[in-house]
Every structure is written in structure tokens, then in C-alpha cells.
Image (cartoon, rainbow, N blue to C red):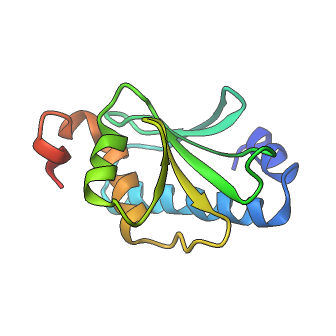
Amino acid sequence: MTPDIQAKFSSYPLAAQKQLEEVRRLIFAVAEENALDTVEESLKWGEASYQVKGGSAIRIDWKPKDPDVIKVYVHCQTSLIETFREIYRQEFDYEGKRAIVLPLTAAVNGGPLKHCLQLALKYHSLKHLPLLGA
């Protein structure tokens, strides 16, 4: 983890830190399992950002105005959230066309979230397919 992201996460409540770190680990695991390029980790717009070549950026963050959740952001001009909503209507809450909303108590070790992260990390090779090939 880069020092700036470590500092950012450390400024949050412990439950938010743990949830963000779990999502971060899942992003790296998905990239490795799918033999994707190196994950670039940085801060963008004050949020932890993750991207691989050929993928859409994924940002994760916690905000004091929504203290019981973290959000997994994707680019709002992609079809990612629209696709996630179609496939996983009951599994997640969403914020517009830009984020999956995850309660701090939600399990993030795989399943639907892992699939969503995979679609985002492979977005540019899937964007021409119906429902991103899901």
C-alpha cells in the first residue's frame, strides 16, 4: 500500500479502514487471478484509486456524511453500474451511475463484489458485449 493511501485509510474509523483494506485486497486478488497487468495504486480526487491496463479505474472511500458505509466508485460514463444493477439487483445498494454502496458489516471476500471488480478491471475488452459478457 502506498504511504499516501495508508495515511488516508488511517485517518478513518477502524471499521472503515478494515472494510477498505478488504476491498483493496480483493482488487489485487482479482487482478492476479485474471492475469491482468500490474495494478496501479494512487490517490485520485482524494480517494484510493486502482487501475490496470485495459480496465476502468476503481476508487474506494469512506465519507463522514455516510459513516456506516464505504463506496466502490467506477467511472460514471461506463455501463458498469447499469450492468451491476441488472445482474445484482438485490445484493447491493447503488449511488447513481457511479458507486456500489457497501455497509461496513458486509462480507467482501468474493461473490458478487468480486465479479463486479473483475468486470471493471476488464472493462475495455468487455464493453462491446451485452451485460459486459456476464
Residue at (46% x, 62% y) in the render: 29
Residue at (67% x, 45% y) in the render: 61
Q: Nearer the viewer, residue 79 or 3?
A: 79
Q: Nearer the viewer, residue 52 or 132?
A: 132
Residue at (50% x, 73% y) in the render: 109
Q: Nearer the viewer, residue 66 or 74?
A: 66
> Where does the image place residue 84, in percent across and percent down from the top left?
33, 51
Task: Tell how many labels.
Answer: 0
> Where does the image place residue 40, in percent across and percent down from the top left?
53, 38
Q: Is residue 11 left or right of residue 20?
A: right
Q: Is residue 14 left or right of residue 5?
A: right
> Where does the image place residue 34, in percent across and percent down from the top left?
30, 57
Residue at (83% x, 65% y) in the render: 14
Q: Is residue 124 left or right of residue 62?
A: left
Quadrant in which the C terminus appears: bottom left
Asked where in the image residue 129 lies, by quadrant, the reply is top left
> Where does the image place residue 132, in percent across and percent down from the top left?
19, 45
